[in-house]
Amino acid sequence: MKGIGPSAETLGQRVGFFSRYTHVLFILVRDPDVTIREMSIILNVTERTVHVILNQLEQQGFIQIDRQGRKNSYRVLLDARSKSRFEQGCTVREILKMISDS
């Protein structure tokens, strides 16, 4: 639709298919010992933003955070089901499999 606000291109933004929450899950599956600082650099967001996302993912039952002093380790709960109407109750495992099979 032309003329309804500025496009992402004119704003200098890139459009992606997945949310930051999904990106964090991808990162954690690949490296459960990644630091918040490393995630913030990868995602190009603040450490605070990553911290908020991790806490929400933990509260919603998608990850488990094992706190070991100043170091955290993360476990993605692959059988956790999405409550979103868009994913229709798919598990994290099913969503990751769909993406990796493509």
Image (cartoon, rainbow, N blue to C red):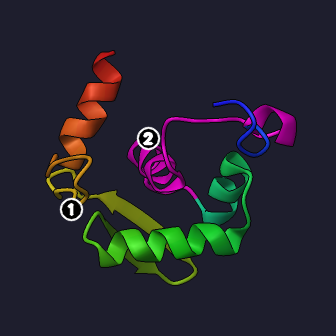
Amino acid type of disc 1? Lys
Query: Could you give the CA–CA distance between mark 1 and mark 2, rounded to whole angstroms?
Result: 24 Å
Picture disc at residue 39:
none
Q: Nearer the viewer, residue 7 or 71?
A: 7
Circle nearer the N terminus (1, 2): 2
Q: Residue at horizontal 40%, vertical 63%?
A: 74
| Residue 4 drawn at (x, y percent) | 70, 42
Judged left or right of residue 23, residue 58 is left
| Residue 29 drawn at (x, y percent) | 38, 45
Considering the numbered disc 1 on the image, is that residue within a helix, a strand or a loop? loop
Residue identified by numbered label 2 = 30
Judged left or right of residue 58, residue 23 is right
Magenta region, residue range? 8-34
Judged left or right of residue 28, residue 37 is right
Judged left or right of residue 52, residue 37 is right
Considering the numbered disc 2 on the image, is that residue within a helix, a strand or a loop? helix
Picture disc at residue 83:
1
> Which of the two marks, 1 or 2, is nearer to us in this view?
1
Q: Nearer the viewer, residue 44 or 83?
A: 83
Q: Residue at horizontal 16%, vertical 46%?
A: 90
| Residue 36 drawn at (x, y percent) | 62, 65
Q: Residues within 10 Å of mark 1 (few under 14, many from 20)?
A: few
Q: Quadrant of residue 102?
A: top left
Q: Residue at horizontal 41%, vertical 51%?
A: 25
Q: Is residue 75 magenta?
A: no
**On screen, residue 65 above or below 102:** below
Q: Residues within 10 Å of mark 2 (few under 14, many from 20)?
A: few
Amino acid type of disc 2? Arg
